[in-house]
Image (cartoon, rainbow, N blue to C red):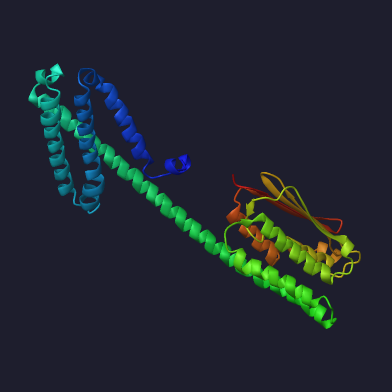
């Protein structure tokens, strides 16, 4: 049996566990004299007292508040509270103070009946107040959970919409590549189609979760690189390397693909003489870093819209949704070279 402390502390019943634990300890200390006099009486009083107090708390939480207070039947609510308080007082005086411990606890017999009624009634009212506080805490917890679920559903919806933009963008670029190979009657065309099929399988079926295994996402990047290498002439100037240990790390899917696409679109595939693209994925325990540099034409380097294409705009939005305050994304152009840096901090 697994003991999940985090799950227990996050439970909406956690405050109940703490309260009853404190009550039991307090009762045990305050009434230890009973144990010294008579263990059976001590145990019976312990059980009766806690059963009566639990009856007050959960009668209020499960019956009175839902059926009267929440329905704005305030008169019925307070009358019911008063009656239950009197019943608790009567049970405490008759069963516990008079019958069980009257001969042991001398002061019980010395106190006036009015004083004993007042004290026990106020104790009962105190637990009505405590149970009402439980109700408020529970309401707050449920509202917070509802808000969290709404935000989660919205995030999923937004991410699905953004992913739906990735596929057409990627397909548009890849089919252009296929068209070029088909015009050339290249023998590489079947291999490109096979790689494309593997990528589409990943993008359509495996990347629908908020997170996927890093290993799967890297395989998808390698397929994309293989497609591009099949149609490039200067393949020695194109590289994608992975450093570090790739294990069971999980990331949001399809974050790095738009960066590679952007590099090929504005760099190597843009009729640039001596075009090159160097990309690197670095994996450590806490961070995943993607670095890339590729040359661009002089006209492209002067184009301020380079960083505002569909792919990079989409990527910015997805990063804000999936890695808020846990990512660093920078791009810059220097001497007709476009630098890309993306670092993700993994959740613990």
Residue located 30% across and 40% down the image: 133
| Residue displayed at 37% across by 47% down | 140
Q: Is residue 5 visible?
A: yes
Q: In which quadrant is the C terminus drawn? A: top right
Asked which quadrant contains residue 300, the reply is: bottom right
Image quarter for residue 106?
A: top left
Is residue 245 toward the left or the right of residue 112 in the image? Answer: right
In this orientation, which residue lies closer to the viewer: 115 or 314?
A: 115
131 vs 286, left or right, is left
Quadrant in the rendering for residue 101: top left
Which residue occupies 41% across, 54% down? 146
Q: Position of residue 171 (x, y in %)?
A: 70, 73
Q: Quadrant of the N terminus?
A: top left
Q: Judge whether residue 261 can be spotted in this image.
A: no
- Residue sitting at the far left: 113
Q: Residue at x 82, y 67 (%)?
A: 229
Left or right? Give the position of 153 relative to 325: left
Picture layout, residue 176 above or below residue 18:
below
Q: Provide residue 3's location: percent of width, then percent of height.
A: 46, 40
The front one of 34 and 73 is 34
């Amino acid at each position: 049996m697994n003991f999940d402390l985090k799950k227990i502390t996050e439970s909406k019943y956690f405050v109940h566990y703490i309260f009853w634990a404190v009550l039991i300890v307090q009762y045990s200390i305050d009434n230890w004299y009973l144990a010294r006099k008579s263990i059976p009486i001590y145990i019976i009083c312990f059980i009766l007292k806690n059963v009566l107090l639990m009856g007050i708390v959960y009668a209020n939480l499960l019956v009175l508040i839902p059926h009267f207070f929440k329905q704005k039947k305030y008169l019925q609510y307070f009358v019911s509270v008063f009656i239950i308080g009197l019943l608790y007082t009567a049970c405490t005086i008759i069963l516990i103070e008079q019958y069980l411990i009257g001969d042991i606890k001398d002061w019980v017999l010395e106190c006036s009946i009015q004083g004993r009624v007042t004290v026990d009634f106020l104790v009962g009212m105190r637990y009505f107040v405590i149970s009402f506080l439980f109700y408020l805490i529970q309401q707050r917890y449920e509202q917070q959970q509802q808000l969290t679920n709404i935000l989660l559903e919205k995030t999923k919806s937004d991410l699905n919409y953004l992913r739906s933009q990735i596929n057409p963008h990627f397909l548009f670029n890849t089919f252009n590549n296929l068209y070029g190979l088909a015009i050339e009657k290249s023998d590489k065309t079947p291999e490109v189609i096979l790689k494309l099929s593997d990528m589409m399988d990943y993008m359509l079926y495996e990347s629908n979760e908020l997170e996927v295994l890093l290993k799967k996402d890297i395989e998808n990047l390698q397929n994309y690189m293989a497609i591009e290498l099949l149609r490039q002439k200067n393949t020695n100037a194109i590289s994608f390397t992975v450093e570090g240990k790739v294990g069971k790390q999980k990331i949001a899917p399809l974050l790095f693909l738009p960066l590679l696409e952007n590099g090929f679109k504005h760099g190597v595939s843009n009729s640039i003489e001596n075009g090159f693209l160097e990309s690197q994925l670095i994996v450590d325990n806490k961070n995943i870093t993607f670095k890339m540099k590729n040359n661009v034409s002089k006209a492209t380097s002067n184009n301020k819209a380079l960083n505002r294409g569909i792919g990079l705009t989409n990527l910015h939005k997805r990063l804000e949704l999936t890695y808020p305050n846990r990512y660093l994304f920078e791009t810059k152009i220097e001497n007709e070279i476009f630098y890309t840096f993306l670092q993700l901090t993994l959740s613990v």
